[in-house]
Image (cartoon, helix red, strand yellow):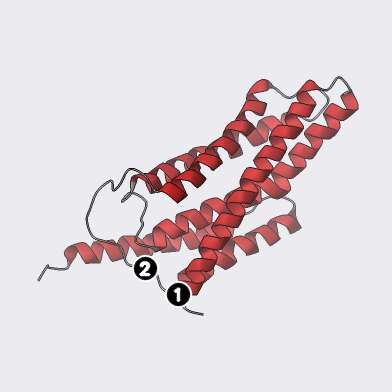
Amino acid sequence: MRTKTWRQLTVWLHIVTSVGWMGQALALFTLLVIGRTSDDREIRVAATSMAHEIDTFLLAPLANASAFTGFMLAAATAWGFTRHWWVLAKFAITLVQLYAGIFLLSGALRDSVGGDPPPVPLVAGTALMASALAFQAWLSVAKPWGKVRSGVKPPTAPTWVFAAAVFAPLTDITVGLLVGYPLPVLSLAVLIVQLVRRRRELGQASMTPVA
């Protein structure tokens, strides 16, 4: 297939996984609200346990795939990471979301399984996650605020980069389901390779004399 087709597939996968990420964040929020407000201990345990399972087997893999495909679209196209304010904003928000999800929310969610009502910050965190994703969707549509800076326009990556951007997260999701926890190893490897390629391309372009 042509580069354009693989790029479109990467965009499609980014949209699908981003919508899935937001949907699962809303599902977590709903379940945690139930766990927070119910007087029935069995319902609280069931709600928080289900929220934990959703986080492990659905939200985390979709979040990883969404972030990875977004990073790849920035690293493999002329958009870049820091050439446009809306892309830079999405990049920064995604990094914060990944940190909060991995190191704060997931641990707190795991600790909340047991019968006690989930803490308010955990419930609020899932709502903030869904809200941030909705805001990122608006950024993708509106593309506000113009350019951060001008400069050398990065070239579009070759076909194999976009093909890898599609297959890597799908492979990681499959492996993660088999082993029982998210394992985005291949996605990280592909992203690192492309970041190194992009750095070399920009370095060569900056050294090319202007006619």
Q: Is residue 154 above or below residue 137?
A: below
Mark 1 Cα shell of 10 Å, populated few (<14), some (14-19), many (≥20)? some
Between marks 2 and 1, how big is the CA–CA gap?
9 Å
Q: Is residue 19 above or below residue 75?
A: above
Report the front residue among 146 and 27.
146
- In this rendering, would 139 be left or right of 23? left
Residue type at mark 2? Answer: Thr
User: Which residue sits at x=58%, y=50%?
Assistant: 18
Task: Give the labeled residue for mark 2.
Answer: 156
User: Which residue sits at x=49%, y=54%?
Assistant: 70
Find the residue positioned furthest to the bottom: 1
- In this rendering, would 29 be left or right of 68? right
Label annotation for residue 3: 1
| Residue 139 image-quadrant placement | top left
Residue type at mark 1? Answer: Thr
Report the front residue among 30 and 73.
30
Asked whether the residues under the numbered discs 2 and 1 touch, taking CB atoms below 8 Å apart as contact, a structural biologist would say yes
Report the front residue among 20 and 209.
20
Q: Residue 200: horizontal and vertical position, in percent?
A: 30, 64
- In this rendering, would 208 be left or right of 189? left
Q: Earlier in the sequence, mark 2 or mark 1?
A: 1
User: Which residue sits at x=45%, y=73%?
Assistant: 4
